[in-house]
Image (tube, helix red, strand yellow):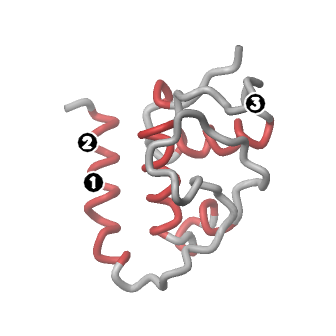
């Protein structure tokens, strides 16, 4: 197991108990394409990362883990419009990598 994967696993294990305390609404601005568990392509993000993702101790663990899960599973898929990642998309993928996600799991600029 790589160090990065071990750190991500620790993050998940440490935050799992907190998920039980979270409400049904994760809040925030990340669009994980609900209703499409395995999309063939991904949509561009329309909003910048909010404090649910960037607020440190005030972040919403459920929202952060959903974003991490989405990019880990789908981040290398092409964008549905065929265009490269936007500046907003890049801020999300930079956040993903900054939180310990594998940078090879997200789209790279062309």
Where residue 80 appears, as percent x and y from the top left, is 68, 33
Whether 64 is drawn above or below 26: the answer is above
**Mark 2 crowd level (few <14, some 14–19, many ≥20, 10 Å Cα):** few
State how far apart marks 3 and 1 are (Cα): 36 Å
Which secondary structure, mark 2?
helix
Which residue is label 1 attached to? Answer: 10
Residue drawn where x is 53% and y is 34% of the image = 40
**Mark 1 crowd level (few <14, some 14–19, many ≥20, 10 Å Cα):** few
State how far apart marks 3 and 2 are (Cα): 35 Å
- Tell me the mark number nearer the camera, choosing from 3 and 2: 3
Q: Is residue 69 left or right of residue 7?
A: right
Residue 99, numbered circle = none
Which residue is label 3 attached to? Answer: 81
Give whichever of discs 3 and 2 has the lower sequence position: 2
Between 43 and 56, the one lying in front of the other is 43
Where residue 36 appears, as percent x and y from the top left, is 51, 51
**Whether label 3 touches label 2, CB < 8 Å:** no
Residue drawn where x is 27% and y is 54% of the image = 10
Q: Is residue 92 left or right of residue 32?
A: right
**Whether label 1 touches label 2, CB < 8 Å:** yes
Q: Is residue 2 left or right of residue 47?
A: left
Which residue is label 2 attached to? Answer: 6
């Amino acid at each position: 197991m790589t160090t990065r994967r071990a750190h991500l696993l620790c993050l998940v294990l440490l935050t799992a108990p907190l998920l039980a305390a979270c409400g049904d609404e994760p809040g925030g601005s990340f669009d994980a394409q609900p209703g499409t568990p395995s999309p063939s392509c991904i949509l561009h993000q329309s909003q910048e990362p909010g404090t649910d993702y960037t607020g440190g101790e005030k972040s919403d663990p459920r929202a952060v883990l959903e974003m991490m899960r989405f990019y880990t599973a789908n981040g290398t898929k092409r964008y549905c419009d065929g265009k490269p990642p936007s500046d907003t998309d890049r801020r999300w993928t930079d956040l993903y990598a900054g939180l310990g996600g594998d940078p090879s799991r997200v789209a790279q600029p062309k």
